[in-house]
Image (tube, rainbow, N blue to C red):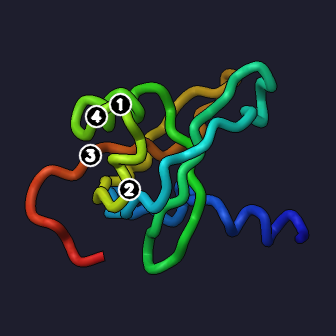
């Protein structure tokens, strides 16, 4: 698989509407090495977004919000609707767009 094909497996901030998009969590997640710091294990989840299955990593705040809403066992998150929001963050002195994940509260949207 070439780099472009690998990148297409991951949610990109450019795919997210500026007001946010809905997605469904499809698995319990798995901790993987960060591409920047091999010491850090980041949670990686499979989600459905725009009728495609993609991977997404979650930052600490996103995980905390999901734990607060759905519980600490990520198996309980499977099938839950979440909101994906693009945000600008500083990484290594550069401003980059990232995606945060928040629990969806309200009627279940059509995804």
Q: Dot 2, crowdedness within 10 Å: few (<14), some or many (≥20)?
A: some
Q: Secondary structure at mark 2?
A: loop
User: Image quarter for residue 7?
Assistant: bottom right
Q: CA distance from mark 4 to mark 3?
A: 11 Å
Residue 87: give x, y in percent of width and height: 43, 41
Residue 79: give x, y in percent of width and height: 33, 61
Q: CA distance from mark 2 to mark 1?
A: 12 Å
Q: CA distance from mark 2 to mark 4?
A: 12 Å
Mark 4 and mark 1 residues within 8 Å of each other at the beta carbon: yes
Residue, x 31% and y 76% (percent of image)? 111
Residue 88: give x, y in percent of width and height: 48, 38
> In terms of depth relative to the viewer, which is nearer, 16 or 70?
70
User: Image quarter for residue 70?
Assistant: top left
Q: Is residue 99 above or below residue 20?
A: above
Q: Secondary structure at mark 3?
A: strand
Q: Is residue 5 left or right of residue 102?
A: right
Q: Nearer the N terminus, badge 4 or badge 3?
A: 4
Q: Is residue 19 visible?
A: no
Q: CA distance from mark 2 to mark 3?
A: 12 Å
Q: Dot 3, crowdedness within 10 Å: few (<14), some or many (≥20)?
A: many
- Tell which tag, 2 or 3, sits nearer the viewer: 2
Q: Nearer the N terminus, badge 2 or badge 4?
A: 4
Q: Dot 4, crowdedness within 10 Å: few (<14), some or many (≥20)?
A: few
> In terms of depth relative to the viewer, which is nearer, 70 or 61?
70
- Tell which tag, 4 or 3, sits nearer the viewer: 4
For residue 71, the mark is 4
Give the residue number, with chain letter if any, for mark 3. Answer: 103
Residue, x 31% and y 43% (percent of image)? 102
Give the residue number, with chain letter if any, for mark 2. Answer: 78
Q: Nearer the N terminus, badge 2 or badge 1?
A: 1
Name the image quarter holding the N terminus: bottom right
- Tell which tag, 1 or 3, sits nearer the viewer: 1
């Amino acid at each position: 698989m070439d780099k472009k094909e690998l990148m297409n497996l991951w949610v990109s901030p450019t795919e997210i509407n500026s007001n946010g998009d809905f997605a469904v969590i499809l698995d319990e997640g798995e901790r993987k090495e960060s591409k920047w710091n091999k010491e850090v294990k980041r949670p990686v989840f499979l989600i459905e977004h725009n009728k495609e299955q993609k991977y997404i990593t979650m930052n600490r705040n996103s995980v905390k919000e999901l734990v607060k809403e759905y519980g600490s066992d990520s198996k309980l998150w499977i099938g839950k609707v979440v909101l994906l929001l693009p945000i600008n963050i500083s990484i290594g002195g550069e401003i980059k767009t990232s995606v945060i994940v928040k629990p969806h509260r309200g009627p279940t949207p059509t995804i």
